[in-house]
Image: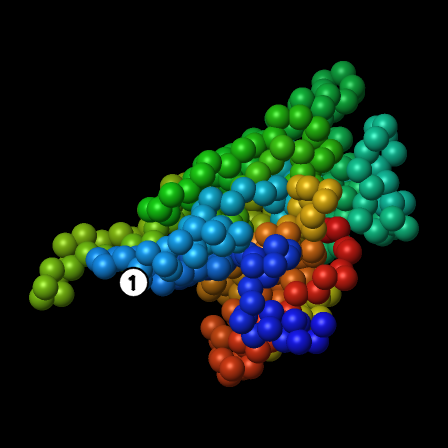
Amino acid sequence: MIFMINKIRNLEITPAQLALDPCSGSVVITDVNTGETLACVTYPGYDNNRLANNMDTEYFAKLSQDLSGPFYNKATQQLTAPGSTFKVITVVAGMEEGIVNDNYGAVCDGQFDKIANAPWCWLHSGHGYMNAVSGITNSCNVFMNQVAYDLGMDANGKYSDSLGVEKLMKYANLFRLNEKSGLEITEVSPTMSTSDALRTSIGQSDLSVTTSQLARYVTTIASRGTSYELSLLDKVTDSKGEVIEDYTPEVKGDMDVADYTWTTVQAGMRGVAQNNASLSSLGISVAGKTGTAQEDLTRPSHALFMGFAPYENPEVGIAVRIGNGYASSNAVDVAKDILRYKYELADESDIVTGAASSVDTTAVRND
């Protein structure tokens, strides 16, 4: 057993070759002040040079048979539910619709009790009293369900599920989570929710997005409302270095959202990082939101994290997804290593060693 574990840890045998989860992942990193894409990574990757000019047919055949699907770009083509990363939108919707304010809160006893078959909170024992900031920080399903329920109240004081979904999708669309990110490679379109406001409020129902779309979403949060058309290209020059065409990301919109709303949701995201051992000890202030997305009961949930740093003066936005990665803590560890490298908080060999053995298959938190 130890022999096999070491082979996998050293990548002499890949998880895909043994049909083990997780065996794939993706990361998109942006400059939140310009919208520039700093990195777009799909894992596992492959060597393009061996498929150009004189193609290495044996290598191509090996890639084609790899169960991890290396030709399938996980950053722009893999769709999963956003999970709890969507909860920031739920709070923004509640605040901007005049429902959530400083006096608004909900008591979490483990399950929302105003509708039958409501989803459980991930903490079955309950969080107690939650407000907007603590609701995000603790990723409380009951608080988000209460917001969705109140958003769905019609003029007669009767709950309408379709109205709740409509209000939530209004703000998802303002974040342009319903659109492709703009990256100039194959990218699939997201799907937005059409029913079940309570599960929509926690990033489930029929919502599905790519890692690239999550990256634009968190960039918009970090920039307090500026929505960019992401681009992989910087510029085209001639042989003398003269710029022929510049690909500065286009600003597609500035969200008309109150400063206090941004301050509130960013404070909630800061609380997520402060309560997380991996992020709180980094040496740089981070704000983020974790998420897990269940897609197949026979396989682990997808692990997600989106965040930005530094919290006080945001520079970079990060979206991470590990397909069938068990728990969001594993996606957090990837983001942690990226920030350690970016801000020179550890040497590269330390980061690589940590990443190779970071997946925790025992974690069960569903946030």
Residue that badge 1 annotates: 49
Left/right of residue 78 with respect to residue 263 in the rendered view: left
Residue at coordinates 47% horizontally, 51% vertically from top-left? 65
Label 1: few (<14), some or many (≥20) within 10 Å? few
Say how many tags the image has.
Answer: 1
What's under tag 1, amino acid-wise?
Asn
Q: Position of residue 359 (x, y in %)?
A: 66, 65
Q: Position of residue 284 (x, y in %)?
A: 57, 73
Name the quarter where the N terminus is drawn: bottom right
Left/right of residue 10 with respect to residue 152 in the rendered view: left
Left/right of residue 268 with respect to residue 117 in the rendered view: left
Q: Is residue 145 above or below residue 242?
A: above
Q: Is residue 332 above or below residue 192?
A: below
**Does any portion of residue 6 appear in the rendered image?**
yes
Q: Position of residue 144 (x, y in %)?
A: 74, 41
Please state which of residues 348 and 86 is positioned toward the viewer in this rendering. Answer: 348
Residue positioned most to the top: 156
Q: Position of residue 197 (x, y in %)?
A: 70, 30
Please state which of residues 24 and 137 is positioned toward the viewer in this rendering. Answer: 24
Left/right of residue 299 with respect to residue 82 in the rendered view: right
**Does any portion of residue 336 appear in the rendered image?**
no
Residue at coordinates 51% horizontally, 37% vertically from top-left? 190
Residue 320 placement: quadrant:
bottom right
Q: Secondary structure at mark 1?
A: helix
